[in-house]
Image (cartoon, rainbow, N blue to C red):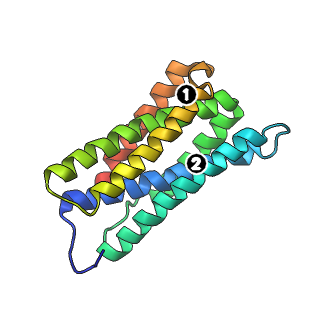
Amino acid sequence: MPRNRPLPKRTEEMVRVDHAGEYAAVAIYQGQRAVFEKLHGKSRIVEQLTEMEAEEQHHLAAFDDLIQTKGVRPTAMTPIWGVAAYGLGVATALLGEKAAHACTEAVETVIEKHYDDQVKELEAEGETELSPMFAQFRDEEAAHKDLAVEEGAHEAPAYPLLSAFIKAGCRAAIKISEKV
């Protein structure tokens, strides 16, 4: 994507918030892996987290590129989101595998809808460069969510409360990151 064509303001907001979200997703998985890698018998979940983190890292690299080539200002909240996300990863891992999967399911439920809304908005505007990438990322996030559900996310301790808390945090971070 050439730098000489600036993005519309709303598209810049999308790139800013999606960059922050992918940065946070990587940090969540790093926090979870930090716990599970120290525990005996957790190689399966460590492998799952490693694979999902690699996909999130790929998404983050794409947004890093957009930020640089299009001159989009990243959110000033990045350091805070990084610490909060890593802490969320550690905390949910300490609650066990099902809670870690509940975290993934909650985050990816919000992010899947977020990307889907963005894809629809971009397509309605006739935007053809970013909408396919966002659609691909949406589908990969949905696959993470589906895996988490298959692995027992809904069986986590206090699942409804944990899920609602995480979803609310994601929605708030999205709104803040669009502007700050």
Residue beneath disc 1: 149
Q: Is residue 37 left or right of residue 150?
A: right
The disc placed on residue 88 is none
Amino acid at pointer 2: Met
**Vertical comparison of 101 with 69: above or below:** above
**Vertical comparison of 70 with 124: above or below:** below
Q: 53 or 78: which is nearer to us?
A: 53
Q: Position of residue 5 (x, y in %)?
A: 20, 76
Q: Is residue 14 among what the camera can see?
A: yes
Q: Position of residue 64 (x, y in %)?
A: 43, 67
**Vertical comparison of 33 with 13: above or below:** above
Dot 1 or dot 2: first in sequence order is 2
Amino acid at pointer 1: Val
Q: Position of residue 105 (x, y in %)?
A: 51, 33
Instruction: Say few, some or many: other residues with alpha carbon within 10 Å of mark 2 (under 14 / 14 to 19 / 20 or more).
Output: many
Instruction: Say few, some or many: other residues with alpha carbon within 10 Å of mark 1 (under 14 / 14 to 19 / 20 or more).
Output: some
Q: Residue at x 39, y 51 (%)?
A: 136
**Vertical comparison of 177 with 7: above or below:** above
Residue beneath disc 2: 52
Q: Quadrant of the N terminus?
A: bottom left
